[in-house]
Each structure stands twice: as C-alpha cells, then as structure tokens.
Amino acid sequence: MIATFFPFDSLVTGAREVGLIGAVVIGFAFGFVLERAGFGRASKLTAQFYLTDMTVLKVMFGAIVTAMTGLVLASGLGLVDLQSVSEGIASPTFVWPMLVGGLLLGVGFIVSGYCPGTSAVSTASGNLDGLLTFAGVIIGSVLYGEVQPLLHGFHVSGDLGPLFLYQVLGVPAPVLALGVALMAMGAFLGAERLERVFSAKRAGLPAPAVGPTPARRIAFATFSGVAALGLVTLAFPGRPSAGEAATRALPITASELAQRVIEAPWKVRVIDVRDEAACLAARVPGSACVPLAKLGEAGLEAATDGRALVLVADGDLAEVPAAARAYRGDVMALAGGYAAWKREAPTTPAAAAAPAPTGAGKAAPARPKKKGGGCS
Amino acid sequence: MDRPASDRFWNPYLAGVALGLVLLSSFLVMGKGLGASGAANRVGVAALDVVAPAHVDAHPYFASLKHEGRGFFDDWLVFEVLGVFLGGVVAAYSAGRLRVGLLKGPRASTGARVAAALAGGVLMGVAARMARGCTSGQALTGGAVLSAGAWIFMLAVFGGGYAAAYFVRRLWT
C-alpha cells in the first residue's frame, strides 16, 4: 500500500524541485479551468448569491463529487490508502474558527466579488479589482498572523483533530460518497430551477440553458457511475473499505510510540494484548488491557475515529490478529513488545500513575503544528 | 448563442468535472490539494520580512515560515499559485479575454468598487488564516476528502455570502 504515487511531502533535495514543478503544472491546470469556467469575472461569481447564475455551485460541487468519488474508487481498488491520503491533505477540524472563518470569508466574497483563488485568476485576466482583492488577501493574512497570538484560545477552539464525515456518521466512505453525489445532483437540478425563476425577474440577463443538456447528462453519468463503482469495491473480499491493512502489522519502535503517546495521545489507541495480570502490573500509559483472546470483543471493527491502533505484545507481533484486521485505520505493533518499551521508552511521571484503561482521553494539550494542511 | 465569443465559458458541469480531475490528479500523484490563500500568506510575511526582519524572527509562526525549508517560497502552494496565474493568463488570452480593466456592477461607482475589492480581500485574508484555508484549500480540497471541518467551513461560506448579499446589492445588481 502506498500513500500516493509521488508524495510531495516526502521529497528531498533534487526530487523536491521536480515536485515544485509538479505544483506549477497542477496550478496551471487549476487556473486554466477556473478562467474557462468564468471565474475570473466578479459578475459571474457574485450572481451565485443573487440566484441568477449558479455556476459557482455547479463547478464547485461538480469538482468535489468528481475528486471525492475518484479518490474513494482508487482507495477501493487498493491503489491508495484513503485515510492516509486524506489526513495528509486536509487540515484537522477546529469547529469554531472554521465556522466563524467561513462566515467572514463568505462576507468577504460577496463584498470583493472573488474568493482568494479566483482573485488570482481575475488578476491574471488583467482585472484591477482582482489584483486589489488579492492584495487585500495578502494584507489580511498577515494581519491575522499578527493578532493570532492574542486570540490563541479561539484559534484552536473546537479541536477535533483529523476528522472525516464518514467517521462522524459511521458509514463506509463509498456509501457516503454516493450519498453526497446524489445530493449534489439534486442541488444542481434545484439550482437550475432557481436560475430560471430569478433570471426571468431581471431583464437583460441571458436565459440559462434549460433541460437535460448533453453536458449535464455526461456529467451526471460520470458522477453516478464512479460513485457506483466505488460502492462495488466494498464487496471485494477481504478489503474492508479504508483499512485494507493486510495482515502484516506495521512496526513502531518504543521511542516512536512514546513520542506519539506524549505529543498526540488522541491520535493513537494503544491496546496491550499481553495477559491481564502482566498488563495491570505495568503498561504503556494510556493503553487498555485486552488479552489477545478477548480482542474480538473490543469492537475494533466498529471504531470510526480514525486513530492509529498500536498493539503491544510480549515481543514482536508478526501478524495482525484476526480481530483487528477490520480496524479502519493503521494497525501497528510495538517492535520488541513491552520488553522493548521497558528498556527504551522514557518513563514520564504521569506514566506510572495513570490508570486510564480505555485509551486516549479527549484533553488536547498543545499539538505540534501540522504543516501544509489544506490551504494553509 | 448571441453572446460574443469572449463571453462564452465552459459548460459548468463539464468545468466541474475538469476541475475535479485536476484535484484528483493532485491527490493521487502528489498527495497534495489545491489552494490559494496559503501562498498569499507566505508572500505577505516575506514582504514583512523585508521591512521588519527582527519582528518576523520574534513571531513564532512567521519565523517558522522563514526558517523551515529554504525559506518563504519553498512551498507547494507558492508554486501552485504561480501556476494558477500562468494558467489564468493563457486561458484568458486564448479566449480573447485578456485586457486590463476594472470589473464592477452596473450601479457601482469606481471608488466603491476599489474600496470593496480591497476591503473584501482583507476580510478574506483574515478569514482564511482563521479557518486554515480558503474556498480552494479548505472548501474544495477538504470538501472532496470529506473533512468534517471543511464542510462546516463550506456551508458557512455560503451562509455568510447569502446573508450579506442583500446589503451590498448596489455593488452587483
């Protein structure tokens, strides 16, 4: 299983420069399509909010559905791992700043006539209003950076870590992808209806295309076809959606585990599979005691929080126990088992005292800043 | 079609599929998404570094942009947005739309348009840093990988836009 074919973040020196050229190529295609969709023009973008031309909705959700169903299908076919690709791409969820930031960005959108990306395309088309907006985005970014230390509590409020809708809803990703595709197509049909009503009210606006145009048919067939194929991959034997983790456990060293347990305990779920007495006597802080024989009762296949699962045995664990194979997320085994932990891992004061039998708590201390998440 | 050639755009559904394929290639090949505001941020902090380098070094976040990797511009999004500009120029030129001007609604004065473009941009710059991304990096990219925060953000963008549209209608209608 590979993360992606040419993962940018793991490129070094010479290869990284090739990766940056890749960034220019991808960006070129992005800018080209945005311009050809009409997104270099403020009038085309703002019409979305006066309901006379809903191109923004159609292009944006059309793109989301295409990329989403494509990625889910690629993951179902075993080409990439949905979880690791998604975590590398999306920023963790911070409910409050994302909600407030979204509202403010929406206001800025209708005031300026652009969003940050389309203001770049507008600038490229020669529009001075686009250039002013892009300059404003630069100024606003720096301003927020200046005041961010003052509102630190707000900036990290509602921290849910990396969280995906299929985890929230507890459904397999291909099922949700199909649902989102169907909802988007419903929204497109509703949007066409609104366009007809509101364009008719305003004289001088060109009448939008009516009815099932060939373009719409092609697009809708693509959306539903790829979504359906993604769903079919669920039926493939021995491949439970995201975690086609095979049977070989990924090894994790004691010091790596210690680092994770200390820095980001909400991202790992540690289960000690040694016999109960040994586990109760001493174990990795935050780990739960579930002897191997009882692992099937731990409900691992139903877990949807996307944490990495780390199994601690007496020694090396060559294979993932059958009960943990359906776990949705990475399954790792502590290299050398508990003996290695005792030998290598630094004992923290909290370690010995913590009873915590059921894995990581919710309290989130300062987290190492995740670089490059989403648009950042 | 009675519209002039320079007013003709791609069909929105096909443009959506095309944009989705660009996004998917970025996911699968590079393990990265699309974005815009992140590059603006780096350009802004780099400019600040020219006038006040000591201030940038004293600010933990700004300093991290300066000293990680080979500096401000050693970044996926900076090069990606460079590509966006190039792609935009080529697309606009080849469609006969490349010309210098100021776009505004029929009732808006030039002064109001200039002020609104700049003020709206500043507001979006603030909002994008608060939300860890803009419509490209958060709503589009995060939305496509079904990130919970991205969907909260996306719905809020539409909510904010529709809520404010009535009050600024003289700019656009």
Image (cartoon, coloured by chain):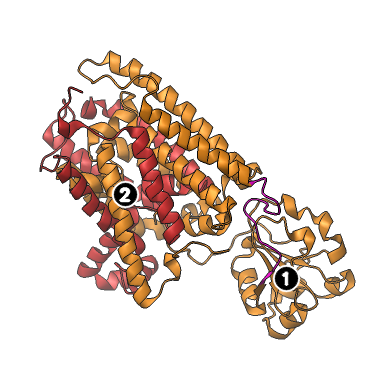
Chain colours: A orange, B red
Residue A320 vertical position relative to residue A189 in the rendered view, above or below:
below
Q: Is residue B38 magenta?
A: no
| Residue A219 image label | none
Residue A1 vertical position relative to residue A172 in the rendered view, above or below:
below
**Residue name at image x 42 percent, y 37 percent:** A62
Give the extent of the magenta segment: A234-250
**Image side of residue B172 versus residue B126, left or right:** left
**Residue name at image x 43 percent, y 49 percent:** B141
Residue A334 location, quadrant:
bottom right
Q: What is the secondary structure assignment of the residue under circle 1?
A: loop
- Res. A217 in view: yes
The mark nearer the N terminus, 1 or 2, is 2
| Residue A30 image label | 2
Residue to which mark 1 is pinned: A285
Q: Residue A33: horizontal and vertical position, in percent?
A: 29, 44
Q: What is the secondary structure assignment of the residue under circle 2?
A: helix
Q: Nearer the viewer, residue A371 or A177?
A: A177
**Residue name at image x 27 percent, y 29 percent:** B168
